[in-house]
Image (tube, rainbow, N blue to C red):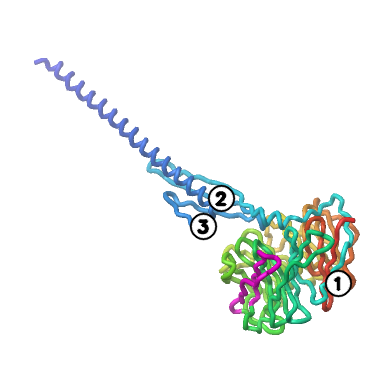
Amino acid sequence: MNYNQKAFSTLEALMALAVIAIGFSCALLVVLGSQALIESSQLGGEALQNARGLVESGGANTVFLGPRPALNFIDEDGYTRQVTGLASWQTTGRPRATIILNSLWVDWQDALAENGCQINQSGLVQSVIANIDFGFGPVAAMQARGQQLFVGLSVTAAKTQPTFLVFSVASSTNPVLEGSLDNATTTTAGLNALAVVGQYAYAASARAVSLSSGFGQLQIINVSQPQNPRLAATYKIPGVTGTSGEGIGNSIFYSDGFVYLGLTKTGGGPEFNVIDVRDALNPKWAGGFSFGSTVNAIVVKGSYAYVAHPMSGGNSPQEQLTVLDVSNPASIVRASGFHALDNQGNGKSLFLQGNNLYFGRTVTNTANPEFAVFDVSNIGPPTPTPLSSLKISSSVNSLMAVNSVLLMLTNSQLRFFDVSGLPSMPELLPPQPLASGAAGTALACSGNTVYAAGASASSGLLSLFAPK
């Protein structure tokens, strides 16, 4: 027997087996790798579909197969929301993969309607073109949307007179009353603030909190038919008590299905309240915050609410502008705030344009300014420093910024400022006087016409300003 030949034959056999084993292993890896790739591709497709579906639907009534996505929101303003859908998955033996989809939601119908104001610095020459006297009650709130002007009267001379008015302003020089409603037929009390969104007007009711029957600080009015506005819901804030004007609706802001309602100083319960109105016919209280003082104005951006109010001796820290973190309405906390060093001048008015927060106070007898601008892109430090400020020597009762023009309504004047180059704020026109005897209360704008509401002891005066 040739042992050398036998040894070589055995070695050859072992090598052949090794080659076969390596080939089989490679084939197995190819198969398994292909399966992993197929699985990863399948999961990736499902993740992409889920993320796309979530971004498009906002998560409402969505059923997911495969990787469950997450949804994040950033509110740019009252009509624009940045939406991010994120889904991730991991296949055995492979690193975790992630799909991120970004989208921008725009409520274009309301945005176009609300942003129908065309005031700009080009040709800005304003003069009073008309004065209207409502005769039976002071104007407390106004909002223009498209070719309609919504007006709220705080009180009327008689119980049967309307407190909510809808005007057609298709002719800017001649507003025509389209429809009206009395929000409380058993009392002369009316409405102190309005926020009109979609088919509803959300209103802060001035009716006394002690009147339990049919009372509610929030009233929701269906305005889908302007000629026939209808009261859709009335909601009373739970746990709020008060007498002699305490705890009534005073200010309001709407954002993303929630109403932020400010009350006058209460006898008990929070003055700042968050109400879920995603079902407008069934409002639900979501949370509140006690200031110990009246809430005069509210604006909301993202997770923060900016609140103007008087400085309360019982609260610490002392301030007239407070920033609240409302990301969890059930647990609202103070984030920061501004305290005017003169310890005077209640926080009175607010308007938010981009990252610029315009803030007005009631008149002071010091040299300290009644008006200031803050950059809300950074809410800290605990006492923010104004970008700009002005001594007005009058209460700043209402503010509105359109393009690069700031409109300011004081006790007796309408003023126009250039805010294109902050901190510089040159005045664009001489102060425009309101109707005789009127104290400025509310602003609205449609087209190139500005509506400035004033109040006397028993009547509402509306001054219309437009280019000559």
Packing grade of label 2 (10 A; few <14, some 14-19, many >=20) is many
**Which residue sits at x=66%, y=81%?**
209
The residue pinned by badge 2 equals 84
Packing grade of label 3 (10 A; few <14, some 14-19, many >=20) is few
- Residue 304 image position (x, y, % from top left): 64, 62
Dot 1: what SS?
A: loop
- Residue 15 image position (x, y, % from top left): 23, 23
Where residue 400 sits, quadrant-wise, is: bottom right
Q: Amino acid at mark 1?
A: Ala
**Which residue sits at x=17%, y=19%?**
9
The disc placed on residue 60 is 3
Left or right relative to 423: residue 71: left
The residue pinned by badge 1 equals 438
Q: Amino acid at mark 2?
A: Thr
- Residue 291 image position (x, y, % from top left): 67, 74
Q: Which residues are magenta?
A: 216-239
Calculate the distance from the C-alpha at mark 3 to the C-alpha at mark 2.
15 Å
Q: Is residue 316 above or below residue 209?
A: above
**Which residue sits at x=86%, y=53%?**
124
Nearer the N terminus, badge 2 or badge 1?
A: 2
Dot 2: what SS?
A: strand
Where residue 461 sits, quadrant-wise, is: bottom right
Left or right relative to 268: residue 88: left
Nearer the N terminus, badge 1 or badge 3?
A: 3
The foreground one among 110 and 311 is 110
Figure disc tally: 3
Q: In this view of the protein, can residue 442 be seen by the observer?
A: yes
